[in-house]
């Protein structure tokens, strides 16, 4: 486990299961390039880590903000678990240094791509959960992820779903989403706009509100949820 000594020192978490911690850092592209080695990529751990992270974040927010409405807490949680924030955590922990990537992904700067770093953060959380259980996982999440909450709220980073949706679309799909009016109803003093969030010609989600801008924001949040990018 010499390779992970620095990571253990930063996180305060020691791993005995070498195969488990290695799996957390194996990207799908590496497995595709090394088919004869019988390796497993980190997407199952990512799936688990995502669920644990959401539970810990929800629990933390529920008790930290007893008078906060559900909508605000949902926005706070989305900001905490979104790709950009998790990528920043990965950089702080230098998780990119441990990634196993294909040659092509390596050459294209995979170790610095936000969505890859965000995914490996979730996979790492999944690995912590399997080896050490919920309490250790909770402490890790509170120290490295929840600790940024006050800064997120202060900067309003929990609000802008449109920017988040655009960033992830450009990274994952190399496309910029756009918004179109689907429906406009009501008198001038009480208009209701239904906006659609699109990737190419595909309608991903709709949002309705009293202005196009607010409806677009709702559509973007719906699109993030529909794509599993929250």
Image (cartoon, rainbow, N blue to C red):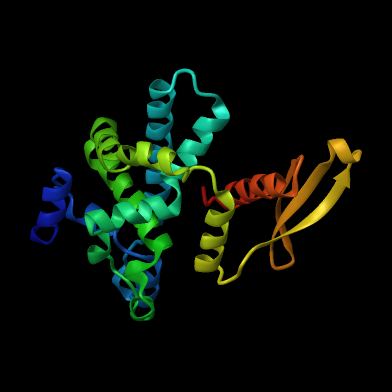
Picture residue at 18% right of the left edge, 50% below the top: 17
Give percent across and percent down for residue 30: 34, 72
83 or 137: which is nearer to us? Answer: 83
Picture residue at 39% right of the left edge, 71% below the top: 29
- For the image, the number of numbered tags is 0
Above or below, comparing residue 202 to residue 146 in the picture: below
Taking the view exactly as shown, the residue that stands out farthest to the top is 67
Taking the view exactly as shown, the residue that stands out farthest to the right is 187
Above or below, comparing residue 172 to residue 55 in the picture: below
Give percent across and percent down for residue 127: 28, 47
197 or 119: which is nearer to us? Answer: 197
Picture residue at 41% right of the left edge, 39% below the top: 154
Give percent across and percent down for residue 106: 33, 77
The answer to which quarter of the image holds residue 112 is bottom left
Residue 45 appears left or right of 10: right
Question: Which quadrant would the N terminus be assigned to in this image?
Answer: bottom left
Picture residue at 25% right of the left edge, 38% below the top: 143
The answer to which quarter of the image holds residue 173 is bottom right
Can residue 65 be seen? yes
Above or below, comparing residue 49 to residue 6 in the picture: above
Residue 167 appears left or right of 20: right
Residue 38 appears left or right of 229: left
Can residue 42 be seen? no
99 or 207: which is nearer to us? Answer: 207
Taking the view exactly as shown, the residue that stands out farthest to the front is 189
Give percent across and percent down for residue 215: 71, 46
């Amino acid at each position: 486990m010499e390779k992970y000594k620095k990571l253990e020192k930063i996180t305060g978490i020691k791993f005995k299961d070498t195969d488990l911690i290695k799996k957390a850092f194996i990207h799908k592209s590496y497995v595709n390039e090394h088919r004869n080695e019988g390796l497993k990529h980190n997407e199952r751990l990512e799936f688990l880590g995502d669920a644990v992270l959401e539970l810990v974040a929800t629990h933390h927010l529920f008790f930290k903000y007893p008078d906060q409405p559900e909508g605000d807490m949902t926005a706070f949680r989305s900001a905490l678990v979104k790709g950009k924030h998790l990528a920043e955590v990965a950089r702080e922990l230098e998780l990119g240094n441990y990634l196993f990537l294909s040659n092509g992904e390596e050459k294209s700067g995979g170790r610095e791509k936000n969505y890859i770093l965000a995914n490996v953060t979730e996979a790492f959380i999944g690995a912590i959960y399997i080896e050490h259980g919920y309490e250790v996982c909770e402490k890790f999440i509170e120290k490295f992820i929840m600790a940024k909450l006050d800064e997120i709220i202060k900067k309003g980073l929990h609000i802008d779903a449109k920017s988040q949706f655009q960033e992830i679309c450009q990274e994952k799909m190399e496309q910029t989403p756009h918004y179109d009016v689907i429906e406009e109803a009501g008198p001038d003093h009480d208009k209701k706009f239904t906006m659609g969030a699109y990737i190419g010609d595909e309608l991903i989600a709709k949002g309705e509100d009293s202005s196009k801008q607010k409806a677009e924001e709702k559509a973007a949040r719906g699109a993030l949820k529909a794509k599993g990018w929250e």
